[in-house]
Image (spheres, helix red, strand yellow):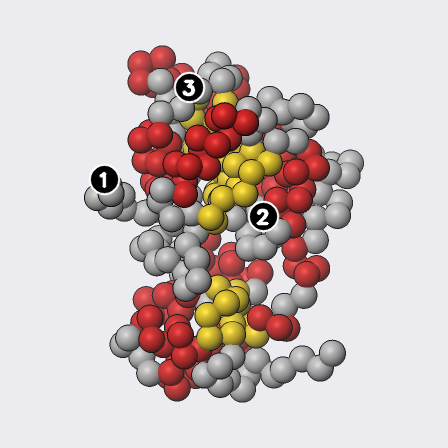
Amino acid sequence: MVLKNPFIAFEHDVYALTRQGQEELRGGGTSLSAADLELLVRADGRATVAQIAASMQALPAQAVAQACVRLARAGLLDLATNLQDDSLDFTDFFSDKPRAAPSQEELARAKAEASTGVSSLKEQGYYVCIARRRILPHLPAIGGGRSAIVVEDDPQLGALLKACLESEGFSVRLAANRNEVLSALREPPLPDIVLLDVVLPDIDGFDVLLRMRQHQALKSVAVVMVTSQATREAVLKGLARGAEGYITKPVEPATLIKAVLAVLGVQEGPRVK
């Protein structure tokens, strides 16, 4: 197969984020302009340059094409047909490998948050820790909104969590065990957020979280633990391994939505009745 040159753009071309581009969007800071950031968000691997230009309105298709070329030269975008599946290689996801211990800084932060969080859990029934709040406004991607994976072995609760996220425009994939987690991760696109139970039939949710943080393509994906384990030790374990949020069961839909949007840095809009 002959790959097209990403540095020559046309209105019908389709661009997608590279791994570097994903990290740029999910990182804590950027030097890119607001227009470039919006373009990165809208380059979802489905929309053409012309469609992106139409959605952005302020820029003509030629200017968007030129911006795509510039971002491609910076390694943030590439033609969707050029991106290979090996960037989403999860074949060794559950294979034995060294488990990285949390740093002293992460442990100190997690201990402080766990101490206050358990008190909050007892008083309010939930606790959410926002560790990496996204700096971008909520810009629905052309052809689809944000995506999420719900890892939950209780079918009724899984369906409830799925319905809650879908009501906010998320496309949702469900997983209830080890094989289904792997299948959900392999299915594009990468999720914006993962709701992760701890007690699963054949895998521990904390182990899944740690492996995600060690995986190049998944290390910046937001994770919210949704679990019945509300002890200080459990909260500490989740936060120290990199979870952005921690919610205890039973889950209230309004609480879940508020937590998810807060973790992603999205302002909650008016509810549709």
Q: Earlier in the sequence, mark 3 or mark 2?
A: 2
In this view, the mark in front (3 or 2) = 3
- Compared to residue 18, the image places residue 217 above or below, namely above
In this view, the mark in front (1 or 2) = 1
Quadrant of the rendered image containing residue 269? top left
Q: Quadrant of the C terminus?
A: top left
Q: CA distance from mark 1 to mark 3?
A: 24 Å
Residue at numbered disc 3: 250
**Which three-letter amino acid code belongs to the residue tagged 3?**
Pro
Rendered location of residue 234, percent (x, y): 52, 19
Give the residue at x 51% y 30%.
Answer: 158
At label 2, counting other C-alpha atoms closer than 10 Å, the crowd grade (few under 14, some 14-19, many 20 or more) is many
- Determine whether the residue tagged by mark 2 lies in a helix, strand or loop: loop
**Which three-letter amino acid code belongs to the residue tagged 1?**
Lys
**Which three-letter amino acid code belongs to the residue tagged 2?**
Leu
In this view, the mark in front (1 or 3) = 1
Residue at numbered disc 2: 218
Q: CA distance from mark 3 to mark 2?
A: 27 Å
- Determine whether the residue tagged by mark 3 lies in a helix, strand or loop: loop
State the count of labels: 3
Q: Which residue of the protein is positioned furthest toward the right in this rendering? A: 96
Quadrant of the rendered image containing residue 25? bottom left
Rendered location of residue 97, percent (x, y): 76, 38
Camera-side residue: 241 or 263? 263
Q: Is residue 37 left or right of residue 92?
A: left
- Compared to residue 52, the image places residue 202 above or below, namely above
Rendered location of residue 1, percent (x, y): 74, 78
- Determine whether the residue tagged by mark 1 lies in a helix, strand or loop: loop
Residue at numbered disc 1: 273
Q: Earlier in the sequence, mark 1 or mark 3?
A: 3
